[in-house]
Image (cartoon, grey):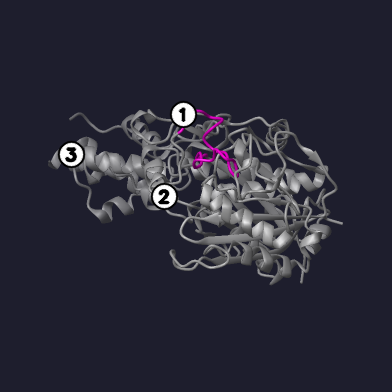
């Protein structure tokens, strides 16, 4: 199989815009979770969030595109620009049908849609803008990136809630392997911190109502009580290894070597895995990569923050790797959960970990919960020689995904 | 209402379609909307804003057939006079 490599990274995260800004924050344990300021959240069951505060759309997105796009797409425009610059690639030099865009989206252009709905009920249907037709829907970011960069190959969007970043990256690997494209923008972003967005999110019952930024998202902790929402994500440049070499790519962050997705059975049925198929996804991703569990040097956990889901993930890791058999981390404790962008950011973070030989920390976990006896890397980064990283993600409704990335050489 | 002018149109184009690189300056009366950076969706938005603001209704074939600011202004003024 043709190897898929990542040659460019663009990060827009609550604790840093720009890959190295973000990475410095992560290694320092610096969180971007703060009291929610985007709107008056007084009447909503969410008090703190991971807002991307270092991003001004007017600086990075042309006015003609700003009027017709949601913030989620605007974050992706900037992340994609940074990823392309990082990759040293100019898309205009490649045949347009050899390039594709494959992103994840969790809820589409929620904030844009909210403003249009406000106009609908306050002024009437004639005041809903024509752009609602293209701004809200899940494929809008993929479509806008495709148009902007002239990437007309097999594009797509994956909607598997918070597992989407892995599913998009995994499908990108397949696309590159099949020869469907040689140069792909993948990953994903999300920006749903508006009243409409958090109302929809809170329906899953998993959001924290804590007003303390350090207490809202404590996965695997004895004090876990839900999660904090955030916005942002990462866009990656992925290429076939041959294409990257042929164009003289400046750097290869790593290879995408294994991927699998599973779906949980109907809730209520209990089995040895507690009704979760997360372990199955991880096993199949390892098999896809041709690796044994002992060859995995770090796991980037889904790290739900919900006590029961944390326990299920811990059980899956315990069965796959043995008791405290592998270092586990959840740097997303510094950003909140980013929905369609979360797992994409985890892929970027894992690639940086491999590059620098260091496992970034999990913060705000003072003591592990019973049943979560993990080797969780906490508070301080841990130096380690990393060959292979396993990344796990779950999406609400039963989605599980697992991705393996490996050192370039 | 007074005559609908290029200045009125430009205000609506900026609000409804955005503007980059100071495209809407100078002699743009006879420049095609496409060259000014406004596609069919932007024209639909601009047309609807004109209708809402001036209380007129532009037939769909007119809205989709105007090619330049001058044509748009002439259509709007004809509709306003007829109203």
Residue B52, given in percent of the width and then of the height, sits at: 23, 39
Q: Chain of mark 3?
A: B
The residue closer to the viewer here, A309 or A342, is A309
Foreground mark, 3 or 1?
1
Tag 2's secondary structure? loop
Residue A385, given in percent of the width and then of the height, sits at: 85, 48
* Quarter of the figure that contains the N terminus of chain A: bottom right
Q: Is residue A409 shown above or below A283?
A: above
> Crowding at label 3, few (<14), some or many (≥20) Cα neighbours within 10 Å?
few
* Quarter of the figure that contains the C terminus of chain A: bottom right
Q: Which residue is mark 2?
A: A204
Specify the quadrant of the image occupied by residue B46: top left
The residue closer to the viewer here, A296 or A267, is A267
* Residue occupying the point 73% across, 34% down: A27
Q: Chain of mark 1?
A: A
* Left or right: residue A227 compared with residue B60: right
Mainly helix, strand or loop, the magenta region?
loop
* Residue occupying the point 73% across, 51% down: A324
Q: CA distance from mark 2 to mark 3?
A: 45 Å
Among the two numbered marks 2 and 1 on one chain, the one whose residue lies closer to the N terminus:
2
Q: Which residue is mark 3?
A: B55
Residue B81, given in percent of the width and then of the height, sits at: 15, 38
Q: CA distance from mark 2 to mark 1?
A: 19 Å
Q: Which residues are magenta?
A: A210-230
Q: Which residue is mark 1?
A: A211
Across the whole image, how many numbered discs are drawn on residues?
3
- Residue A345 in magenta stretch: no
> Crowding at label 2, few (<14), some or many (≥20) Cα neighbours within 10 Å?
few
Q: Are marks 3 and 1 on the same chain?
A: no
The numbered mark at residue A299 is none
């Amino acid at each position: 199989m043709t190897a898929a490599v990542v040659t460019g990274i663009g990060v827009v995260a609550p604790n840093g815009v720009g890959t190295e800004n973000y990475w410095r924050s992560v290694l320092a344990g610096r969180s971007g979770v703060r009291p929610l300021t985007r709107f008056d959240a007084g009447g909503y069951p969410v008090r703190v969030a991971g807002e991307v505060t270092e991003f001004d759309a007017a600086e990075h997105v042309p006015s003609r595109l700003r009027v017709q796009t949601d913030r989620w797409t605007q974050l992706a425009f900037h992340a994609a620009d940074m990823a392309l610059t990082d990759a040293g690639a100019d898309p205009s030099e490649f045949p347009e049908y050899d390039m594709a865009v494959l992103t994840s989206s969790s809820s589409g252009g929620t904030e844009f849609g909210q403003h249009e709905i406000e106009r609908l009920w306050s002024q009437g249907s004639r005041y809903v803008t024509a752009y609602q037709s293209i701004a809200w829907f899940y494929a809008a970011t993929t479509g806008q990136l495709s148009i902007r960069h002239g990437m007309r190959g097999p594009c797509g969007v994956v909607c598997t809630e918070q597992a989407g970043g892995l599913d998009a990256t995994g499908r990108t690997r397949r696309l590159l392997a099949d020869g469907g494209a040689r140069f792909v923008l993948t990953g994903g972003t999300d920006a749903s911190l508006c009243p409409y967005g958090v109302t929809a999110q809170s329906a899953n019952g998993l959001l924290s109502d804590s007003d303390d930024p350090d207490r809202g998202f404590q996965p695997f902790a004895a004090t876990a009580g839900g999660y904090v929402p955030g916005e942002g994500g990462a866009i990656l440049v992925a290429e076939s290894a041959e294409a990257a070499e042929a164009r003289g790519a400046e750097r290869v962050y790593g290879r995408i070597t294994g991927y699998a997705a599973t779906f949980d059975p109907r809730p209520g049925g209990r089995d040895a895995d507690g009704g979760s198929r997360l372990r199955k996804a991880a096993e199949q991703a390892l098999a896809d990569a041709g690796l044994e569990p002992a060859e995995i040097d770090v796991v980037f956990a889904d790290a739900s923050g919900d006590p029961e889901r944390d326990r299920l993930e811990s059980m899956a890791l315990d069965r796959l790797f043995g008791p405290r058999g592998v270092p586990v981390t959840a740097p997303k404790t510094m950003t909140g959960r980013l929905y369609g962008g979360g797992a994409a950011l985890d892929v970027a973070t894992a690639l940086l970990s491999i590059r620098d030989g260091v496992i970034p920390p999990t913060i705000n976990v003072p003591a592990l919960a019973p049943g979560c006896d993990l080797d969780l890397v906490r508070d301080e980064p841990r130096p380690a020689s990393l060959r292979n990283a396993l990344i796990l993600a779950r999406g609400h409704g039963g989605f599980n995904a697992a991705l393996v990335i490996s050192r370039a050489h | 209402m007074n005559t609908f002018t290029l200045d009125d149109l430009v205000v609506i184009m900026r609000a409804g379609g955005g503007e980059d690189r100071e495209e809407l300056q100078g002699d743009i009366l006879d420049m095609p909307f496409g060259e000014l950076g406004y596609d069919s969706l932007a024209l639909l938005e601009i047309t609807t804003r004109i209708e809402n603001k001036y209380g007129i209704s532009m037939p769909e074939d007119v809205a989709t057939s105007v090619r330049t600011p001058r044509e748009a202004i002439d259509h709007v003024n004809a509709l306003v006079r007829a109203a």
